[in-house]
Image (cartoon, rainbow, N blue to C red):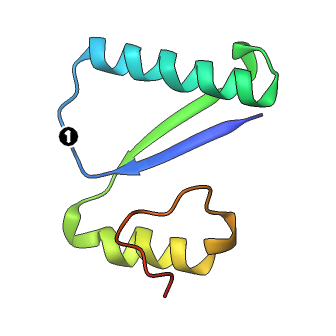
Amino acid sequence: MPHVHIRHFPKDVTPEQLAAFDEAVTSAVTEAFDVGEDVVSISLEPVAPEDWNDLVVTDIAARRELLLKAPGYWDGA
């Protein structure tokens, strides 16, 4: 606890970019939840653009009450 799962379009990311991302997310999570970094887990799931609506948008819509931040284009439908 806590676990952060991020779905995104496929993208080549360097090991340095991943390390910086890991550090930034871990720092934000440990601060927000007042936990040590040893209990934080982060997963990245690439989703092809053609699958985005079926896999991600439908999940967001079904659980919109859990959204901390909605995308700017989101109409909530």
User: Horizontal and vertical percent for residue 26?
Assistant: 59, 21
Quadrant holding the N terminus: top right
The kind of residue on which mark 1 rests is: Lys
Left or right: where does residue 76 sit relative to residue 47? Answer: right
Residue underneath mark 1: 11
Numbered disc 1: secondary structure: loop
Above or below, 64 relative to 70: below
State the count of labels: 1
Q: Residues within 10 Å of mark 1 (few under 14, many from 20)?
A: few
Looking at the image, which is closer to me, 1 or 77? 77
Q: Position of residue 14 (x, y in %)?
A: 22, 19
**Above or below 35: residue 16:** above
Q: Is residue 15 left or right of residue 32?
A: left
Q: Residue at x 44, y 81 (%)?
A: 75
* Residue visible at 41% across and 62% down in the picture: 71
Q: Residue furthest front?
A: 72
Q: Position of residue 42 (x, y in %)?
A: 55, 32
Which residue sits furthest bottom?
Answer: 77
**Residue occupying image coordinates x 48% and y 88%:** 77
Q: Residue at x 52, y 71 (%)?
A: 60
Q: Where, by quadrant of the figure, is residue 56 drawn?
A: bottom left
Instruction: Give the percent coordinates (x, y) of residue 62.
Output: 59, 80
Residue 5's place in the image compared with 12, above or below, is: below
Q: As rendered, which of 1 and 21 lies closer to the eye?
A: 21
